[in-house]
Image (cartoon, grey):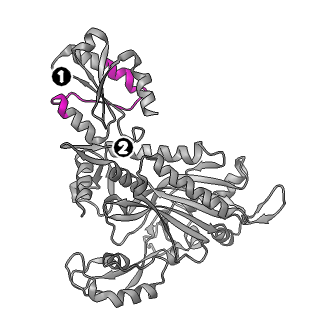
Amino acid sequence: MDDKMQKIVSLCKRRGFVFPSSEIYGGFAAVYDLGPLGAELANNIKQQWWKSMVYLRDDIVGLDSAIFMHPKTWEASGHVSGFADPLVECKNCHSRLRADHLLEDIDVQADEKMSEEEIAEIFDKNKQKIKCPQCGKSDFTKLKKFNLLVKSNLGNFTEDWQKAPVYLRGETCQGIYLNYLNVLNSMRVKIPFGIAQIGKAFRNEITARQFVYRTREFEQMEMQYFCSPQTDMAEYEKLRQYRWQWYLDLGIKEENLKWHKHENLVFYAKEAYDIEYNFPFGFKELEGVHARGNYDLTQHSKFSGVELDYTDPETKEKYIPHIIESSAGVGRTFLALLSDAYSEENDRVVLKLKPSLAPYKVAVFPLLANKPELVAKAREVFETLKSEFVCVWDDRGNIGKRYYSQDEIGTPYCLTIDFDTLENDTLTLRDRDTAKQERVEIGELKALIREKLA
């Protein structure tokens, strides 16, 4: 693991951002829990996304569809027959591994859109160069496709999961497609319009890796935009630029972002790009922006028997809408932000998150924890601020250690109440990024913090 990545993983565990799930039982592979600070950061990411995709857009509405859907949903979408990864097993240690990941490790690309036969041919050609990451041997079984949908026995009382299987959703967008007609009929929308959703999805990954980048339970932020066949590609270009700018607005450095165009498209796609971020393990997908044609609504109309056509109120043209989508992961955005913000300066770790994203916005300290008058005044300031800002109280150790502690978790502003505060009602405000301090009147504090956070 890259040294920076190791430091980020250590920071996340040590400071309450991310914990291994079920750790007291030895953990549960590829599943993670968000700690107190991780939950705050993830919520801030989702709030920023929702604001950008729903509140600031007159043409997009929000949705929260169920995790469970009718099983035919996944037949119509192609997930039951085609949602699979290429699996091989090491004959020596019996580890189950993704063939495309093993090829990637030796700089050979096997596109996910390739058929099982195409990937198998590439794998067989390179088999002698490939080593099992667990035991180092190069003896593998024949490649086969492994379906990633997670089965459930919801509503099935026969104890036979092969009868009428139900699935945890493999992606959130299918709930949007199923509700397209409901939204069209209940809301004041007309094409072009979008539906946005944040929610959990589940994939039975063969080998999940790279911390929270690839997990079996994850949260997606997706927006599906419904267009006419004549305007979909123009809308697609606008969406690409809109989504790129969002990451810049989060504070991510532009040199750490790049576009990756899909050359091997699925049969129904018109165009597909990924926004990639330069993670500690290299440039990897951060978000997909895809032009999907009218495949999705066509399939659901065919399998359900419900007409999903749209009639233009002005031209009277009737068509099945084309869809362009933005699909991002909360976990991947979370990891990109931590990677971008992580900095080591003068023997201190500083998490330079944009203030609006930081788990805590303000930390309040009494200079000395054993002086009741300082503690009382600091408590008064803390109580005044916490109704408007996410604040943290800290009176442990000396003031220098408290500053370093707050730098490490990304708190942008620290307020110290000292003996001068008791005399003139001013306190010391310290900036995380510059470490500079200024005296501020308590009466002006809220307005000043509001301005800095804005």
Q: Secondary structure at mark 2?
A: loop
For label 1, the SS is: loop
Q: Residue 397: within the magenta? A: yes
Above or below, 144 relative to 39: below
Residue under the image location 39 percent in, 15 percent down? 443
Residue at position x 27%, y 45% in the image: 16
How far across and how far down the image is residue 311, in percent?
A: 79, 60
Residue 112, position as x, y percentages in the image: 46, 76
Q: Residue at x 43, y 68 (%)?
A: 150
Front disc: 1 or 2: 2
Residue occupied by mark 1: 369
Lateral position of residue 11 relative to residue 68, left or right: left
Label 2 sits on residue: 353
Amino acid at dot 1: Ala
Please tell me which residue lies in front, 450 or 115. 450
> The disc labelled 2 sits on which kind of residue?
Leu
Whether residue 353 is in magenta: the answer is no
Residue 177 seen in this snapshot:
no
Residue 74 falls in image quadrant: bottom right
On screen, residue 296 versus residue 368, left or right, reads right
Q: Residues within 10 Å of mark 1 (few under 14, many from 20)?
A: some
Q: Horizontal and vertical percent for residue 143?
A: 37, 85
- Residue sticking out furthest to the top: 423
How crowded is the residue under tag 2: few (<14 C-alpha within 10 Å), some, or many (20+)?
many
Task: Kindly report the distance in space between the C-alpha atoms of the residues bearing marks 1 and 2.
Answer: 29 Å
Where in the figure is residue 19, as x and y percent of width and height?
A: 28, 52
In front of the other: 175 or 167: 175
Q: Earlier in the sequence, mark 1 or mark 2?
A: 2
Q: Relative to 161, is 197 on the left or the right?
A: right
Q: Quadrant of the N terminus?
A: bottom left
Q: Which residues are magenta?
A: 380-401
